[in-house]
């Protein structure tokens, strides 16, 4: 008797810890519905045993349907959580993109200003070279 009770408790714990998949629940529901239809044939009189079987099958159908609804609601909750996480990551990505664009714009300005400064320095160097050569020619003449 103890072994049967332990086995029953273990089965109950396992069924609660590892819920059935939606596909298995759907197949179980279809099987129960087929059994129900086989017992409840229209126009056929039912005896007490058939009536009790159909009530038992209907109870099982309600339990399976409840599990299916719970699985779908759990999936809906998870999808909402994932949507919220995706939205927050997209917002973070957008803010980082804006920062990167601002930094890139700053670097572009720095490069343009640096290029202008280098260009001006080259022009000044050329002018200095021309004046230096003229100065050296004048110094040699004197």
Image (cartoon, rainbow, N blue to C red):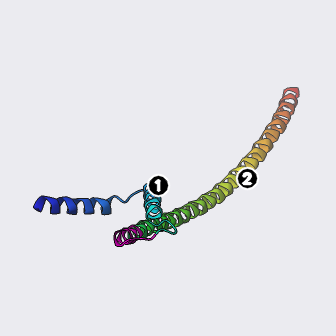
What residue is drawn where x is 79% and y is 42%?
119
Assign the magenta stretch its main secondary structure: helix
Q: Position of residue 51 (x, y in %)?
A: 38, 72
Q: Secondary structure at mark 1?
A: helix
Q: Is residue 50 magenta?
A: yes
Please state the horizontal and vertical placement of residue 11, each as a whole percent of the image: 25, 59
Which of discs 2 and 1 lies nearer the camera? The answer is: 1
Q: Is 109 drawn above or below residue 60 in the view shown?
A: above
Membership of 85 in magenta stretch: no
* In this rendering, position of residue 90 left or right of residue 44: right
Q: Eyeballing the image, is 106 above or below 142?
A: below
Residue at 64%, 54% (x, y): give it: 100
Q: Tell me if mark 1 has few (under 14), some (14-19) or many (20+) residues whose alpha carbon lies within 10 angstroms of its own.
A: few
Relative image position of residue 72 (x, y in whole percent)? 49, 65
Q: Give 71 or 28, whichever is nearer the viewer.
A: 28
Q: Does residue 4 appear left or right of residue 79 in this picture? A: left
Start and end of the magenta stretch? 45-58
- Looking at the rendering, in which quadrant would you find the N terminus? bottom left
Q: Which corner quadrant of the image does residue 32 belong to?
A: bottom left
For residue 23, the mark is 1
**Spatial separation of the CA atoms under disc 2 and disc 1:** 60 Å
Judging depth in this view, the residue of 12 and 135 nearest the camera is 12
**Left or right for 23, reference 8:** right
Query: Residue at image x 88%, y 31%?
Result: 138
At which x and y percent is residue 34? 47, 59
- Residue located beneath label 2 in the image: 109
* Chain-order first, disc 2 or disc 1: 1
| 108 and 13: which is toward the camera | 13
């Amino acid at each position: 008797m103890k072994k049967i009770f332990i086995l029953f408790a273990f089965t109950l714990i396992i069924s609660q810890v590892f819920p059935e998949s939606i596909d298995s629940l759907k197949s179980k529901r279809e099987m129960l519905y087929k059994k129900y239809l086989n017992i409840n044939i229209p126009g056929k009189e039912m005896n007490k045993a058939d009536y009790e079987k159909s009530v038992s099958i209907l109870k099982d159908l309600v339990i399976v349907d409840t599990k299916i609804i719970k699985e779908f609601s759990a999936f809906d909750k998870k999808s909402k959580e994932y949507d919220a996480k995706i939205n927050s990551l997209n917002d973070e990505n957008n803010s980082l993109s804006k920062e990167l664009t601002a930094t890139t714009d700053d670097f572009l300005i720095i490069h343009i200003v640096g290029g202008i400064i280098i260009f001006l320095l080259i022009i000044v160097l050329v002018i200095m070279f021309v004046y230096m050569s003229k100065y050296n020619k004048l110094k040699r003449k004197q």
